[in-house]
Image: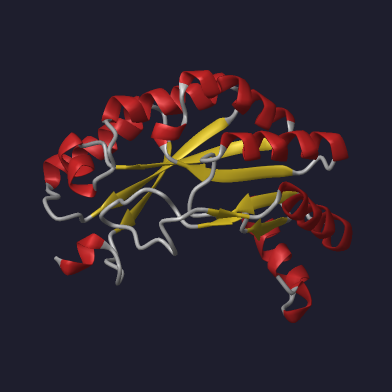
Amino acid sequence: PYHAAFSVPEYINIQKRITGWKTMPIVASRGCPFLCQFCSPSANRLRIRSVDNVVEEMEFLKGNYGVDSIYFWDELQFVKKPWFEGLCRELIRRRLNLKWVFVTRATLVREKDISLLKLAREAGCIRIAVGIESGSELILEAMNKKTSVQEMADALRRVRKAGIKATGSMLLGMPGENLKTVQASIDFAHENLLQTSFYNLIPLPGAEVYDH
């Protein structure tokens, strides 16, 4: 992106007041290979920038604007594990000492990935936001999430086992939603000690749920 086209220092100052960090977003990839009913992805095919290209932008933001943390605004991260490992190793090699956060889904966080998550922690990852969406099996099925409530809980446990903070997001208002399913989401958050953000469904053109 052409950072000179807008007031980066002003943006960073706002983030500093909100989060305590000098944060800037980076988009390392476009697209998502999954087909959740509520989502309107930019593409079903995943397109990823090179590791060097991404790390150079991080280095640029730190060197020119004093950024100390990065939020990856990708639709989904942790899909291509070799690429992700390369990112972590390059960050460690360059000793950037930046904090960073990314978004993923539960089905991508397997038991065998804990060692990779530990590498991410060493590279500066401090938080992973997992798209939980609902604590109700009924709603997860309606969303076409292709996962289960137990799988969500297991993913959060694995992230924490690696020493990284796990947070989540919930989506309310899917067709079929009722007080019982909403309560199931609240219960899931309580039972898993989850820092959760709740959002209302906004049907977007291109999403399956938009036709409802």
Q: Is residue 203 left or right of residue 157?
A: left
Quadrant for the C terminus in the image: bottom left
Comparing 33 with 160, the one in front is: 33
Residue at 72% from the left image edge and 53% from the top image edge: 54
Q: Is residue 32 above or below residue 138?
A: below
Q: Is residue 181 above or below residue 15?
A: above
Residue at 62% from the left image edge and 52% from the top image edge: 71
Q: Residue 96: which quarter of the image?
A: top right
Comparing 18 with 175, the one in front is: 175
Farthest bottom residue in view: 5
Q: Position of residue 70 (x, y in %)?
A: 68, 51
Comparing 121 with 14, the one in front is: 121
Q: Residue 200: which quarter of the image?
A: bottom left
Farthest front residue in view: 45
Q: Position of residue 204 (x, y in %)?
A: 31, 69
Q: Residue 155: which quarter of the image?
A: top left
Quadrant for the N terminus in the image: bottom right
Residue at 54% from the left image edge and 24% from the top image edge: 113
Q: Is residue 187 left or right of residue 154?
A: left
Q: Position of residue 34 (x, y in %)?
A: 36, 48
Comparing 29 with 21, the one in front is: 29
Residue 172 in sight from this viewpoint: yes
Display coloring: secondary structure
